[in-house]
Image (spheres, helix red, strand yellow):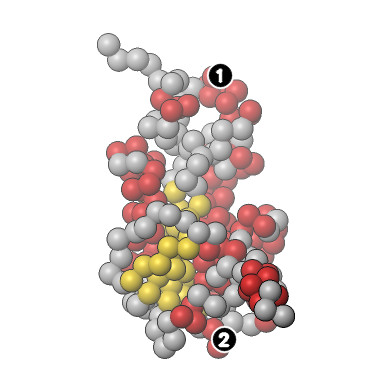
Amino acid sequence: METQQPILWFMAMISPSFHLEKKYPSYAVVGIDEAGCGPWAGPVVAAAVIIDQSLFPETFKTRVNDSKKLTKKQRQTLFQELILHPCLTYHIGLATVEEIDFFNISHATRLAMRRAVDGLKVRPSYALVDGIRKPELECSVEMVVKGDQSSFSIATASILAKVERDKIMNDLHQDFPVYGWDKNAGYGTLLHRQALRTYGVTLHHRRSFAPIRALLPTVV
Protein backbone atom coordinates (compact mmCIF):
# COMPACT_ATOMS: atom_id res chain seq x y z
CA MET A 1 0.00 0.00 0.00
CA GLU A 2 2.85 2.40 0.70
CA THR A 3 3.91 2.41 -2.95
CA GLN A 4 0.43 3.36 -4.17
CA GLN A 5 0.15 6.77 -2.52
CA PRO A 6 2.67 8.59 -4.79
CA ILE A 7 0.97 7.06 -7.83
CA LEU A 8 -2.45 8.29 -6.70
CA TRP A 9 -0.99 11.74 -5.96
CA PHE A 10 0.48 11.89 -9.47
CA MET A 11 -2.83 10.87 -11.00
CA ALA A 12 -4.56 13.67 -9.06
CA MET A 13 -2.19 16.19 -10.58
CA ILE A 14 -3.13 15.26 -14.16
CA SER A 15 -6.35 17.28 -14.14
CA PRO A 16 -7.09 20.67 -12.57
CA SER A 17 -8.29 20.99 -8.99
CA PHE A 18 -8.20 23.54 -6.18
CA HIS A 19 -5.32 21.87 -4.33
CA LEU A 20 -2.98 24.81 -4.99
CA GLU A 21 -5.57 27.42 -4.11
CA LYS A 22 -6.35 25.62 -0.84
CA LYS A 23 -2.79 26.23 0.34
CA TYR A 24 -3.97 29.80 1.01
CA PRO A 25 -7.31 29.49 2.84
CA SER A 26 -9.34 32.62 3.50
CA TYR A 27 -7.29 34.64 1.01
CA ALA A 28 -8.04 35.86 -2.51
CA VAL A 29 -5.94 33.71 -4.85
CA VAL A 30 -5.58 34.77 -8.47
CA GLY A 31 -4.69 32.40 -11.29
CA ILE A 32 -2.77 33.92 -14.21
CA ASP A 33 -1.97 32.60 -17.67
CA GLU A 34 -1.03 34.05 -21.04
CA ALA A 35 -1.64 33.37 -24.70
CA GLY A 36 0.47 34.44 -27.63
CA CYS A 37 4.14 34.27 -26.67
CA GLY A 38 5.20 32.33 -29.75
CA PRO A 39 3.29 33.87 -32.69
CA TRP A 40 4.98 36.18 -35.18
CA ALA A 41 2.14 38.71 -35.13
CA GLY A 42 -0.34 40.26 -32.74
CA PRO A 43 -0.26 41.16 -29.04
CA VAL A 44 0.41 38.89 -26.09
CA VAL A 45 -2.66 38.48 -23.88
CA ALA A 46 -2.93 37.53 -20.21
CA ALA A 47 -5.92 36.74 -18.01
CA ALA A 48 -6.18 36.99 -14.22
CA VAL A 49 -8.93 34.97 -12.53
CA ILE A 50 -10.16 34.75 -8.94
CA ILE A 51 -12.65 31.93 -8.33
CA ASP A 52 -15.10 31.71 -5.45
CA GLN A 53 -14.72 27.99 -4.85
CA SER A 54 -18.07 27.74 -3.05
CA LEU A 55 -19.85 28.90 -6.21
CA PHE A 56 -17.78 26.96 -8.76
CA PRO A 57 -20.27 24.43 -10.21
CA GLU A 58 -19.58 20.77 -10.88
CA THR A 59 -20.23 21.32 -14.57
CA PHE A 60 -17.15 23.56 -14.69
CA LYS A 61 -15.06 21.08 -12.73
CA THR A 62 -15.67 18.42 -15.36
CA ARG A 63 -15.02 20.73 -18.33
CA VAL A 64 -12.45 23.36 -17.39
CA ASN A 65 -8.95 22.31 -18.37
CA ASP A 66 -5.79 23.55 -20.05
CA SER A 67 -7.04 25.51 -23.06
CA LYS A 68 -4.73 23.51 -25.37
CA LYS A 69 -6.63 20.34 -24.44
CA LEU A 70 -9.96 21.81 -25.51
CA THR A 71 -11.42 22.32 -28.96
CA LYS A 72 -12.07 25.81 -30.25
CA LYS A 73 -15.82 25.33 -29.77
CA GLN A 74 -15.34 24.05 -26.22
CA ARG A 75 -13.17 27.05 -25.35
CA GLN A 76 -15.62 29.56 -26.82
CA THR A 77 -18.60 27.97 -25.04
CA LEU A 78 -16.79 27.89 -21.72
CA PHE A 79 -15.57 31.46 -22.17
CA GLN A 80 -19.15 32.75 -22.45
CA GLU A 81 -20.35 30.68 -19.50
CA LEU A 82 -17.39 31.56 -17.28
CA ILE A 83 -17.40 35.32 -17.72
CA LEU A 84 -21.12 35.48 -16.89
CA HIS A 85 -20.94 33.25 -13.80
CA PRO A 86 -20.91 34.85 -10.32
CA CYS A 87 -18.09 32.57 -9.17
CA LEU A 88 -15.62 34.47 -11.35
CA THR A 89 -13.77 37.75 -10.91
CA TYR A 90 -11.51 38.35 -13.89
CA HIS A 91 -9.67 40.84 -16.02
CA ILE A 92 -7.77 40.53 -19.30
CA GLY A 93 -4.64 42.54 -20.07
CA LEU A 94 -2.36 42.70 -23.07
CA ALA A 95 0.95 44.03 -24.31
CA THR A 96 1.11 45.44 -27.82
CA VAL A 97 3.37 44.50 -30.70
CA GLU A 98 5.20 47.78 -30.16
CA GLU A 99 5.86 46.87 -26.52
CA ILE A 100 7.00 43.37 -27.50
CA ASP A 101 9.51 44.90 -29.93
CA PHE A 102 10.62 47.68 -27.57
CA PHE A 103 11.21 45.42 -24.55
CA ASN A 104 11.14 41.71 -25.48
CA ILE A 105 8.52 38.99 -25.38
CA SER A 106 9.35 37.93 -21.82
CA HIS A 107 9.06 41.45 -20.44
CA ALA A 108 5.92 42.14 -22.48
CA THR A 109 4.31 38.95 -21.18
CA ARG A 110 4.97 39.95 -17.59
CA LEU A 111 3.59 43.40 -18.39
CA ALA A 112 0.36 41.90 -19.74
CA MET A 113 0.05 39.76 -16.60
CA ARG A 114 0.49 42.77 -14.33
CA ARG A 115 -2.13 44.72 -16.28
CA ALA A 116 -4.56 41.81 -15.94
CA VAL A 117 -4.10 41.76 -12.16
CA ASP A 118 -4.24 45.55 -11.86
CA GLY A 119 -7.63 45.50 -13.58
CA LEU A 120 -9.24 43.19 -11.03
CA LYS A 121 -11.93 44.60 -8.75
CA VAL A 122 -10.55 42.47 -5.91
CA ARG A 123 -6.95 42.80 -4.69
CA PRO A 124 -5.43 39.29 -4.54
CA SER A 125 -3.15 38.18 -1.71
CA TYR A 126 -1.53 35.35 -3.64
CA ALA A 127 -0.95 34.67 -7.33
CA LEU A 128 -0.56 31.31 -9.04
CA VAL A 129 1.17 31.93 -12.37
CA ASP A 130 1.58 29.41 -15.16
CA GLY A 131 5.08 28.87 -16.54
CA ILE A 132 8.38 30.52 -15.69
CA ARG A 133 7.85 34.23 -16.48
CA LYS A 134 7.35 35.77 -13.04
CA PRO A 135 5.48 39.08 -13.09
CA GLU A 136 6.14 41.87 -10.60
CA LEU A 137 2.98 42.03 -8.52
CA GLU A 138 1.99 43.58 -5.20
CA CYS A 139 1.16 40.12 -3.82
CA SER A 140 3.06 36.89 -3.26
CA VAL A 141 3.68 34.94 -6.48
CA GLU A 142 4.03 31.20 -6.94
CA MET A 143 5.18 29.97 -10.35
CA VAL A 144 3.57 26.70 -11.44
CA VAL A 145 4.99 24.79 -14.39
CA LYS A 146 2.06 23.35 -16.37
CA GLY A 147 -0.22 25.13 -13.94
CA ASP A 148 -3.03 25.16 -16.50
CA GLN A 149 -3.17 21.39 -16.04
CA SER A 150 -3.27 21.42 -12.23
CA SER A 151 -5.10 24.56 -11.07
CA PHE A 152 -8.69 25.52 -11.88
CA SER A 153 -7.80 29.21 -11.54
CA ILE A 154 -4.91 28.98 -14.00
CA ALA A 155 -6.84 26.71 -16.37
CA THR A 156 -9.72 29.18 -16.42
CA ALA A 157 -7.28 32.01 -17.09
CA SER A 158 -5.78 30.03 -19.94
CA ILE A 159 -9.21 29.68 -21.58
CA LEU A 160 -10.02 33.37 -21.22
CA ALA A 161 -6.63 34.49 -22.55
CA LYS A 162 -6.70 32.09 -25.50
CA VAL A 163 -10.24 32.96 -26.61
CA GLU A 164 -9.64 36.70 -26.25
CA ARG A 165 -6.42 36.54 -28.25
CA ASP A 166 -8.02 34.42 -30.97
CA LYS A 167 -10.77 37.06 -31.23
CA ILE A 168 -8.17 39.81 -31.62
CA MET A 169 -6.36 37.87 -34.35
CA ASN A 170 -9.63 37.11 -36.12
CA ASP A 171 -10.45 40.83 -36.11
CA LEU A 172 -7.01 41.65 -37.54
CA HIS A 173 -7.56 38.96 -40.17
CA GLN A 174 -10.46 40.97 -41.58
CA ASP A 175 -8.01 43.69 -42.65
CA PHE A 176 -5.11 41.36 -43.54
CA PRO A 177 -6.77 38.13 -44.78
CA VAL A 178 -3.80 36.81 -46.80
CA TYR A 179 -1.87 35.80 -43.66
CA GLY A 180 -4.50 33.40 -42.36
CA TRP A 181 -4.56 34.79 -38.83
CA ASP A 182 -8.09 33.49 -38.29
CA LYS A 183 -6.64 29.99 -38.50
CA ASN A 184 -3.00 30.26 -37.40
CA ALA A 185 -3.40 33.05 -34.78
CA GLY A 186 -0.17 34.62 -36.02
CA TYR A 187 2.03 31.53 -35.76
CA GLY A 188 4.57 30.88 -38.51
CA THR A 189 2.60 28.37 -40.54
CA LEU A 190 3.36 27.63 -44.19
CA LEU A 191 0.53 29.93 -45.35
CA HIS A 192 1.79 32.72 -43.11
CA ARG A 193 5.38 32.33 -44.35
CA GLN A 194 4.30 32.33 -47.98
CA ALA A 195 2.16 35.45 -47.49
CA LEU A 196 5.08 37.22 -45.82
CA ARG A 197 7.31 36.51 -48.81
CA THR A 198 4.62 37.70 -51.22
CA TYR A 199 3.05 40.64 -49.42
CA GLY A 200 5.66 41.63 -46.88
CA VAL A 201 5.55 42.61 -43.21
CA THR A 202 2.58 44.44 -41.66
CA LEU A 203 2.40 46.78 -38.68
CA HIS A 204 1.05 43.86 -36.66
CA HIS A 205 4.16 41.69 -37.10
CA ARG A 206 6.74 41.41 -34.34
CA ARG A 207 9.81 42.89 -35.97
CA SER A 208 12.06 41.82 -33.11
CA PHE A 209 11.36 38.15 -33.92
CA ALA A 210 14.13 36.66 -36.09
CA PRO A 211 11.91 35.34 -38.95
CA ILE A 212 10.29 38.78 -39.33
CA ARG A 213 13.51 40.73 -38.83
CA ALA A 214 15.09 38.70 -41.66
CA LEU A 215 12.45 40.04 -44.07
CA LEU A 216 13.04 43.70 -43.24
CA PRO A 217 15.25 45.86 -45.47
CA THR A 218 18.80 46.24 -44.22
CA VAL A 219 19.69 49.77 -43.18
CA VAL A 220 23.24 50.73 -44.22
| Mark 2: secondary structure | helix
Residue 178 screen position, x and y as percent: 59, 30
Q: Is residue 202 above or below residue 165?
A: above
The amino acid sitting under disc 2 is: Leu
Residue 7 screen position, x and y as percent: 68, 70
Q: What whole-number distance in Å separates the C-alpha atoms at marks 1 and 2?
A: 52 Å
Numbered circle sitting on residue 198: 1
The foreground one among 202 and 25 is 25
24 sits to left or right of 198: left
Disc 2: which residue: 55
Q: Residue at x 58, y 68 (%)?
A: 150
73 sits to left or right of 142: right
Foreground mark, 1 or 2? 2
The amino acid sitting under disc 1 is: Thr
Quarter assignment of residue 100:
top left
Q: Residue at x 50, y 52 (%)?
A: 35
Q: Residue at x 61, y 32 (%)?
A: 189
Quadrant (top left/top right/bottom left/bottom right) for the N terminus: bottom right
Residue 34 screen position, x and y as percent: 48, 55
| Mark 1: secondary structure | helix
The foreground one among 106 and 172 is 106
Quarter assignment of residue 61:
bottom right
> Looking at the image, is mark 1 or mark 2 earlier in the sequence?
2
**From this viewpoint, which residue is outermost toward the front?**
2
The foreground one among 146 and 36 is 146
Numbered circle sitting on residue 80: none
Q: Is residue 73 above or below residue 63?
A: above
Q: Is residue 179 above or below residue 144?
A: above
Q: Residue at x 44, y 49 (%)?
A: 44
The local crowd at label 2, few if under 14, some if 14 to 19, many if 20 or more residues have their Cα within 10 Å, is few
Q: Do tag 1 and tag 2 residues touch (Cβ < 8 Å)?
A: no
Task: Inspect this view and state whether residue 85 appears.
Answer: yes
